[in-house]
Image: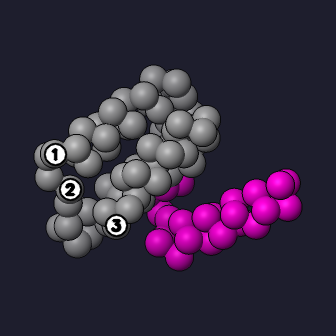
Amino acid sequence: MYALVPLAAAAALSGDDEWATRLVATRHAITERTGATVVGGLVGDLRDQTEHEVRDRLGPERWARAYAAGRTCAIDSVLNDIDRFLKQRSRDV
C-alpha cells in the first residue's frame, strides 16, 4: 500500500494522470478498509502534491471518473497494470 504513493507520483510525472488518479483512489480505498495510512513526512507531502496536480490537470469530470475506477481496483489489478507497462516498454526498446 505504501508503494502506491511514489507509483502515483511516477505515473503523474510520466503524464499518465488517469492512472495516477486510479492509484490515489486505490490507496484511499485500502486506507479506509484497513486503517493503514501514510502520516506526514515526505511521503505525505508527495501524496498531497500528486493528488493536487493530477486533479488540476484532469479537471473535475475526468478526475471523478478515474477516481471512481480506482476505488474499485484491487492490488492484483495494479500489479497487472505494472506488468503490462513493463512488457510494453520492453517491446518498445
- Locate residue 6, reporting x and y percent: 40, 51
Helix, strand or loop status at disc 1: helix
Q: Are marks 3 and 1 in contact (CB under 8 Å)?
A: no
Magenta residue check for 74: yes
State which mark lies toward you, 2 or 1: 1
Which of marks 1 and 3 precedes in the sequence?
A: 3
The amino acid type, in three-letter code, at marker 1 is Gly
Q: For the residue carrying disc 3, how many other residues have a C-alpha within 10 Å: few (<14), some (14-19), or many (20+)?
A: some
Three-letter amino acid code at the position of disc 3: Met
Residue that numbered label 2 is attached to = 38
Mark toward the start of the polypeptide (2 vs 3): 3
The C terminus lies in quadrant: bottom right
Query: How dense is the environment of label 2, judged by Cα within 10 Å: few (below 14), some, or many (20 and up)?
Result: some
Mark 3: which secondary structure? loop
- Residue at x-position 61% and y-position 64%: 82
| Left or right placement of residue 10 versus residue 25 in this view | right
Q: Nearer the viewer, mark 3 or mark 1?
A: 1
**Mark number displayed over residue 83:** none
Q: Secondary structure at mark 2?
A: loop
Farthest residue toward the front? 93
Q: Which residues are magenta?
A: 65-93
Quarter of the picture containing the N terminus is bottom left
Residue 27 showing in the rendered view: yes
Residue 36 in picture, x, y percent from top left: 20, 67
Q: In the drawing, what numbered circle is on residue 1? A: 3
Q: Are marks 2 and 1 in contact (CB under 8 Å)?
A: yes
Is residue 4 toward the left or the right of residue 14 in the image? left
Most foreground residue, 78 or 93: 93
**Whole-number angstrom distance, CA of label 2 to CA of label 3:** 9 Å
- Residue at x 14%, y 52% (from the top left corner): 39
Q: Mark 1 sits on what residue? A: 41
